[in-house]
Image: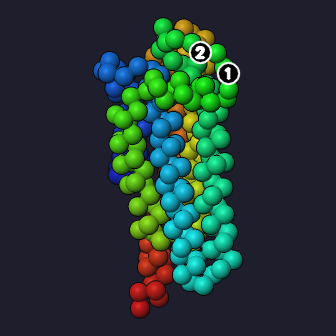
Amino acid sequence: MDNLPLRHIPLILFNLLPLALIIDGYWQPFDALAFYWLELIAVCFFGTLGNAMSAIYQFSQKNIGAGIGQTFGTIFFPLHFGFFLVMLCFPIGSFLPPGTPTRPLTDPLVPLRVVTENMPFFEMLPIVMVWQCFVFITRFILSGRYKQDAPAFVLSAYGSLAVLFVSAFFGVLIGLSTGNRIWGAVILVALKTLIAYLVARHRPAEKSQTEENPAASA
């Protein structure tokens, strides 16, 4: 398993889940985009939570300046990240199933409403929340990153956003140019899984504070 460390298998399985459900006929190609977009909602939630935890920790350590900085980050991050989430709804909306009623673009939030209304929201939400909770605990809590490197999870969140932007661009492009949305979904899922795996592979395994600093356990 040197070429595929066990710690990466859950990541791969999670990212391939939409494709398996599309092949099974349970989901439509649009649902793959919706699923990954909803994952970013979970990423935003836990990124905000991570910033808040970092702020509380810094204040508890009397690091007032760092605590204030993290407090501003807690407010700024969801607003800034949320802007990109809304923008992502434009390409996602172009992948809606054929026959979906169209709406006039009366304001920038129309694509957001269309996307959320057509996705199996309450079916997908528990899956992405459980997955991102697992990621948050293993990469941020257990490793003690909230004490050492407060922006770590937030930077990872923007990386996830960039991965979906790239994957969605090529997936939608292939789907619309060929007139076959299933092929677009295949390209999307393949790219999303591959890039996420390569990023994880080149990231060293998370270590707890005790492992990184043995003196801390003395």
In the rendered structure, are the residues bearing label 1 and label 2 in contact, judged by CB atoms less than 8 Å apart?
yes
> Which residue is drawn at the image coordinates 40% and 54% (left, top)?
133
Q: Residue furthest bottom?
A: 218
Between 218 and 106, the residue placed more toward the observer is 106
Which amino acid, by three-letter code, is at mark 2? Arg
Residue on which the image places disc 1: 106
Secondary structure under tag 1 reads loop
- The Cα–Cα distance between marks 1 and 2, rounded to whole angstroms, is 8 Å
Q: Secondary structure at mark 2?
A: loop
Q: In the shown orientation, is residue 51 left or right of residue 142? A: right
Q: Who is closer to the viewer here, 198 or 165?
A: 165
The one nearer the camera, 126 or 190, is 126
Residue at position x 62%, y 30% in the image: 109
Instruction: Please tell me how crowded label 1 is: few (under 14), some (14-19), or many (20+) other residues with Cα within 10 Å.
Output: few
Residue at the spot of label 2: 103
Give the x, y percent position of residue 82.
61, 43
Q: Amino acid at mark 1?
A: Thr
In the picture shown, does residue 121 fall above or below 147?
above
Vertical comparison of 124 with 81: above or below: above
